[in-house]
Amino acid sequence: MRKILLRLRVNGAHHEVAVRPSATVLDVVRDTLHLTGTKRGCDMGTCGCCTVLVDGRARLGCLTLAAEVEGCEVRTIESLREGEQLHPLQSAFAECGAAQCGFCTPGFLMTCSALLSRTPTPTPEQVKDAISGNLCRCTGYTKMYEAIDRAAAQMRTEPAREPELSSREAVSGGSR
Amino acid sequence: MTTWTSPAISSMRLERPRSLAHALDLLEADRGLTPMAGCTDLYVGIHFGSLKQRRFLDLQPLASLRKIQKRPDGTLVLGALVTYSQCLDSPLVARALPMLASAAKEIGGVQIRNRGTLGGNLGNASPAGDTLPVFLAADATVVLASARGVRRVPISQFFLGYRKTARRHNELITEIEVPPIAGKQWFRKVGTRAANAISKVVAAGVRGEGITFALGAVAPVAMRAYAAECALGSALPLSEAHRALRSEITPIDDLRSTAAYRARTACALLTQFWSETR
């Protein structure tokens, strides 16, 4: 099949990839860029495991064509921590026991980071609404609410953290 | 490296138009081209094998279809690629069509709302599409464009049958026009879980000088309940309106609900509409 060449910006790095026109963002980040933190759950937009940020908004990697995000800033779970320093959401999820099997966790963390960057002091209703598109079959959500509250409180006391932008130009010839 | 690819998706062909005119030319030239917008239904259909089409026209490059505008005559014009999140963020929608904002809030989680489009909901024409009763109750007009010109179809004539619309193969839904609405607007969705469930029954209504009430998932198409509207308008007892409503809907048993539950719920929604818009 004819492939198309895309220039994508993922986690601050530039990538040039040759993919099928129908390749999704999920296909490209996992299989071409080998960023496997983003999970393939249902592949039909129900579970939220594949959530990434496109220009700061939560989007489903499985329902978004890679060709569409050319010129956008894509962020995956791999960009959340800063060096060895976990993001406040990651620390809070660990401390509160908000991750059990862990498969849904990257999706929740990305959804929550989009929420907290737009709404630093969310009401319980806003938190509930924000994570309504992410499914977790282990935790029962209570510990997640605690973790999100804790992270929000911590982020309000810390100076806003700008995501580290790498100027590294990575060129990978994807095979998809 | 192992690469997982759905066999169905790997055989897809995708056209990416440069402009609306280009998109319309592509549609004119190829009968088998299916327009795709947010893909929230389409990709599911491809994965499950229920969608047989393999050639698609990606509408995402058409930025001109993403606008929400108000004309001087008060008509609200919604571009076909407007997402549910845009509806929720729009002061124009909040003022002119609050029942659309209510519907958008109950459609999917945040990620689906950032992705799904109004034109997609109309074009897909699922009987359970959540915005369809809203546009029916609002007496909206669907604007269809082709390389040969523009056609305006009243929404009451747009849904022809189960997932079948008045859109011709060479046409694109470009806009939805909503006339100014006088009266109280009302929306309610009944399903198992707001963010992740398809509606068992969904309803929208307007109560002002005139009365409109529309329902989804109680017939092969989303529909206006004209007989029930008429009964309510002539101040008959509510039980008469219920009788009228039961006579015009044709709910079915399926995996989400039963015909009996849907009929009872449709009547309950009519009661709720009437009491909450007093």
Image (cartoon, rainbow, N blue to C red):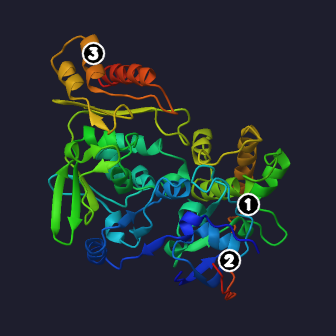
Instruction: Give the residue displayed 32% in from the left and 38% down from the top.
Output: B222
**Marks 1/3: CA distance?**
62 Å
Q: Would you call the spot at circle 1 few (<14 residues within 10 Å), some (14-19), or many (20 or more)?
A: few
Q: Position of residue A1 (x, y in %)?
A: 54, 80
Whether residue B275 is visible here, answered yes or no, is: yes
| Viewer-nearest residue: A61 or A94 | A61
- Secondary-structure class at tag 3: helix
- Secondary-structure class at tag 1: loop
Q: Position of residue B108 (x, y in %)?
A: 51, 46
Numbered badge on residue A32: 2
Q: Position of residue A109 (x, y in %)?
A: 70, 56
> With B84 as the anchor, is B197 left or right in this view?
right
Numbered badge on residue A158: 1
State which quarter of the image contains the C terminus of chain A: bottom right
Q: Would you call the spot at circle 3 few (<14 residues within 10 Å), some (14-19), or many (20 or more)?
A: some
Mark 3, residue position: B243
User: The residue under label 2 is which amino acid type?
Assistant: Thr
Q: Would you call the spot at circle 2 few (<14 residues within 10 Å), some (14-19), or many (20 or more)?
A: many
Q: What chain does badge 3 belong to?
A: B
Mark 2 or mark 1, earlier in chain: 2
User: The residue under label 1 is which amino acid type?
Assistant: Glu
> With B69 as the anchor, is B259 left or right in this view?
right
Image vertical order of residue B168 relative to residue B94, above or below: below
**Marks 3/2: CA distance?**
59 Å
Image vertical order of residue A22 relative to residue A127, above or below: below
